Amino acid sequence: MGTRDRLTLGSLPPAVYAAITAEIGEIRRTEPVATGLNSTFATVLHTADSAVFVKGMLDSHPGVRGQRREAAIAPHTAGIAPRLRWHLNTGGWDLLGFDYIPGRAADLSPGSPDLARLADTLARLGELVPPPLPLPRIEQRWTALADDADLALLAGEHLLHTDLNPNNVLISDGRAWLVDWAWPTLGASWIDPACAALWLIAEGHTPAAAESWARTLPTWSHRPPNGLDTFVAVNARLWTSIAADDPQPWKLALRNAANKWLTHRGT
């Protein structure tokens, strides 16, 4: 969703506008945000002494469940995601206000310095204690894509992001932050490195090079025998189906990357 499709601050209902200003004070300047797929409203709001990234949608929006999951997980992602200042539900709207971290989307192409930055953040994510929340499990999310024995190879108790597209990896001051936690999941500790490796292939890496990058992460060695083959096969099925239903360029790129990786694995 681009800026042309999003509501402006002045388009919000008066009660919603008032609720935002009650949290942050008088708004001096707005800065629309173009990236992201779900939010109806996404803007950086500048006050006299701070800046807050605010995103939101109507309560009736199909993405609101993911946004509420993001609000629930936020207290447990300190140091790897921007701090959530507040969560508002008012006037038929659901809104999140985060510390604004100026930055850019990650460059995941071969040779990019952002690859090491992402690896460092994923290593820290792998050390987090899983939150006491009823999060979906990776084997539940992908239950239609493999049998139970194969899905058990992906199961675990680690907190996963699972949507590591370049726009969800914010580069600021030489480090990577993970944003848009709409799909927090419990699973094996090596799953997020594998999710990132899939994006690396989509961004021009060979499967062998993507696996070599993932090998720098401590959790990569936790893969059980056949675990990676199962992950790749599941994602080839997943993205082939997604791209068939909605052939947007980025979905086609993920489909092609997953199937290229599948061929490389010989499965």
Image: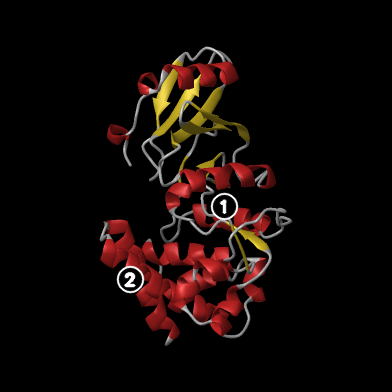
The amino acid pointed to by label 2 is Thr
> Could you give the CA–CA distance between mark 1 and mark 2, rounded to whole angstroms?
30 Å
1 or 2: tag closer to the N-terminus: 1
Q: Secondary structure at mark 2?
A: helix
The amino acid pointed to by label 1 is Arg
Q: Which mark is residue 103?
A: none
Report x, y in % for residue 266. Answer: 42, 87
Residue drawn at point x = 49 percent, y = 37 percent: 103
Which one is nearer the viewer's eye here, 23 or 221? 23
Can residue 169 be seen here? The reply is no
Quadrant for the C terminus, please: bottom left
Q: Residues within 10 Å of mark 1 (few under 14, many from 20)?
A: some
Residue placed under numbered mark 2 in the picture: 240
Marks 1, 2: nearer the viewer: 2
Residue drawn at point x = 34 percent, y = 64 percent: 242
Report x, y in % for residue 149. Answer: 57, 84
Q: Secondary structure at mark 1?
A: helix
In the image: residue 71, left or right of residue 10: right
Residue placed under numbered mark 1 in the picture: 117
Relative vertical location of residue 263 with respect to residue 48 in this rendering, above or below: below
Can residue 15 be seen here? The reply is yes
Q: Residues within 10 Å of mark 2 (few under 14, many from 20)?
A: some
Quadrant for the N terminus, please: top left
Relative vertical location of residue 93 with respect to residue 242 in this rendering, above or below: above
Report x, y in % for residue 189. Answer: 64, 67
Report x, y in % for residue 52. Answer: 54, 27
